[in-house]
Amino acid sequence: MFIIEKMWIIFCVVITFYSVHTNTVYDFVGSTVTFKCPYVQEDYTKVLWKGPYGGQTVYAHSNHRNTYLPSDLYNRLFIISNSSFGRYNLQIVNLQHSDEGEYRCSVTYNETTKTKSFNLSLPALLQSLTPSYYRHLKLDPSSKKLIVGHMNYVSIVDILDIPQFPVNYTHIQFPSEANKLNYCTLSKEKIPYCQNHIRVLEFRTDDTVILCGTNADSPTGFELNITDNSYISLGSVPCANDPFDNFTTIYIRDQNQYDKGTMYYGTTLHTEATIFRPIYDSDGRVREYQKGVISSNWMKDPQFVGSFSLKESVLFFFRETATEIDPSEHKVYSRVAKVCKVR
């Protein structure tokens, strides 16, 4: 009799049926995702959520979160419930790469477990096998495009209201000029200092972007049409020559006597730190740049933060080493400079 009971127990375990359905969910780091469990919680059943932390750890059952989860995960985890209908969905805010993996909601009815599986993937918008220095971004909401400036390239990424993967993007190459590259490498490392880091992205019109690249220690401007991806060179411009210096630019579309918008720069160019604004010739072309006094008494090691248009002026925010106090104190002060607009 004992043998028969044991065999019956084994037989019951074998016929228990598990059904698993898997969906892949794509999203971005920093966004919010909600996994909707298709199963309803009824009497004597619980909706159970498991996630990738620790290898399929219980995240929640019904509307109770697992309090033993790490605080940085627990505080981003929520159960969106409608207990009247037995619905319990899992929501995660401020997504991190550590959240990637498989999520499962399951319920058990009459010894049969039904499981819905979601595979969360957080792909990068742009990927590179070598250092690319993705640092400068400009979003164009009207065309739903993100313009990314990096080393030797500008990338134009399609940004949709509902993300679609793989993401569509276009790479446009802006290499350093050969003669500038050769001269630069006599005194600096070829990578990263003697490349063309695109460090300015300012819209001149709705479909035209002004760029500035370090061009192997010889900053050069470009005008890029994001509709057909064509571009022209603007020649030398007073951008930072060092790819790691903090500087700021602003393009102001206000019309002046030359019927043009105006670009302003706050930058350190070959150790000379100041603010630049253009000087136009009689034909309305930029002839050269007017600049502030080159002196450590006027600006000492400035780190530019941002620039903004305000009525008839342009405001430049920066921090610098204070010169009006005892040098032994070595204090850094925040400053704001006001520059009159070109009229």
Image (cartoon, rainbow, N blue to C red):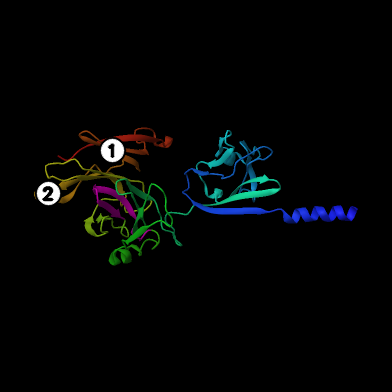
Q: From what the image shows, is residue 281 above or below residue 312?
A: below
Which corner quadrant of the image does residue 291 belong to?
A: top left
Identify the amino acid type marked 2: Gly
- Name the residue at the left extreme: 282
Which residue is pictured at 32% across the width and 58% down the height?
217
Front one among 121 and 296: 121
Mark 2, residues whose alpha carbon is within 10 Å: few (<14), some, or many (≥20)? few
Q: Which mark is residue 308?
A: 1
Q: From what the image shows, is residue 142 above or below residue 229?
A: above
* Residue 300 makes an appearance in the image: no
**Magenta segment: does it hold 194?**
yes
Which residue is pictured at 45% across the width and 54% down the height?
124
- Name the side, left or right, on which 260 lies relative to 338: left
- Name the side, left or right, on which 303 lies relative to 106: left
- Name the side, left or right, on which 161 lies relative to 25: left
Where does the magenta region start and end? 193-213
* Residue 127 makes an appearance in the image: yes
Q: Position of residue 218 (x, y in %)?
A: 28, 58
- Quadrant holding the C terminus: top left
Mark 1, residues whose alpha carbon is within 10 Å: few (<14), some, or many (≥20)? some
Classified by dominant secondary structure, the portion drawn in magenta counts as strand
Q: Which residue is mark 2?
A: 284
